[in-house]
Amino acid sequence: ETGVTQSPTHLIKTRGQQVTLRCSSQSGHNTVSWYQQALGQGPQFIFQYYREEENGRGNFPPRFSGLQFPNYSSELNVNALELDDSALYLCASSQSRPFSTLIYEQYFGPGTRLTVT
Amino acid sequence: AQRVTQPEKLLSVFKGAPVELKCNYSYSGSPELFWYVQYSRQRLQLLLRHISRESIKGFTADLNKGETSFHLKKPFAQEEDSAMYYCALSPYSGAGSYQLTFGKGTKLSVIP
C-alpha cells in the first residue's frame, strides 16, 4: 500500500502565471482534500473532491480550481498567481461513504512548496 | 464560521514534566475535534480525535463543550514528543469525510 504522493516537490513561478499541482491518493481512498499552508500558519482548507465532484470549498477565490480523476488522483490549479500564493500546498486523501457514521482518517502528502516571485 | 485558537506558539518543558497544549474553538454546531502532529522532516499525521476517546503515545484530550476547549495533555514528556502540534476542527459532513480548520500550531520542545 503506497501513501499519498505529491508532485512536484517544489517550484518557482512568476506573478501572473498559472500552476498545476498533482496528488496521488492512497490506495482505496476516494476523497481528496487540498490545503494551503503559509509560513508560520496552520493548513487552510481550499476544497475537497469526492468521486470526481467538488464536495466543499473554503474561502478561496475561483482562480483556485481542481479536478479529481477516475483513479481518484487530483490536481490543484491556480491561475493568475499572486505573491501571497507562496505557500506549502498539502493534499490529503481519505475514504468516504455516504451516510456513514464513521470518521475516516485523512492521510497527508509531503506537500508542494510553491514560491511566487 | 469556525475558528481554532492555539494561544502558545512555542512551549518548552523538561523531560518528565507534564505537558498541556491548549486549544480553544468556536463553532455553532457540534464539531469533530482532532490533534495532528508533525515531527521533524515528516508529514502531518493524525495523533488523536475526540470521538475515539483513546490515548495515543500517552497523550489524551478531553472535549469541554462548556469552555469550548480541547486541550492535549501528557503526564510525562519525552524527548521524542518534540514536534509541531495542530488542533483541528471539522463539521461532520455525514459522508464520513471532514473538512479541517486548523489552528496555527504549537511547537513543543522537550528539554533533556
Image (tube, coloured by chain):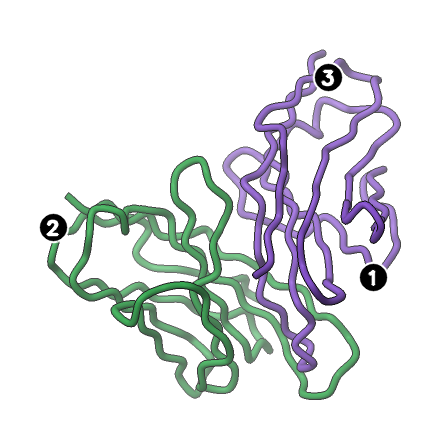
Chain colours: A green, B purple
Which residue matches tag 3?
B13
Tell me if A12 is positioned left or right of A70 in this view. left
- Residue drawn 31% across the image and 66% down it: A61
On the picture, is B10 further left or further right than A8? right
Q: Is residue A54 left or right of residue B8?
A: left
Q: Chain of mark 2?
A: A
Q: Residue at x 55, y 80 (%)?
A: A30
Mark 1 highlights which residue? Answer: B51
Residue A34: image location, x then y, percent: 45, 64
Question: Which amino acid type is shown beneath numbered disc 2?
Answer: Thr
Q: Nearer the viewer, residue B64 or A90?
A: B64
Disc 1: which chain?
Answer: B
First of labels 3, 1 by sequence position? 3
Residue type marked 3: Val
- The residue indicated by pointer 2 is A14
Q: Residue A108: which numbered mark, if any?
A: none
Q: Is residue B88 left or right of residue A114?
A: right
User: Is A18 situated above or below B71?
Assistant: below
- Disc 3: host chain: B
Q: Position of residue B81 (x, y in %)?
A: 71, 30
Quadrant containing the N terminus of chain A in the rendered view: bottom right
**Label 3 vs label 2: CA separation?**
43 Å
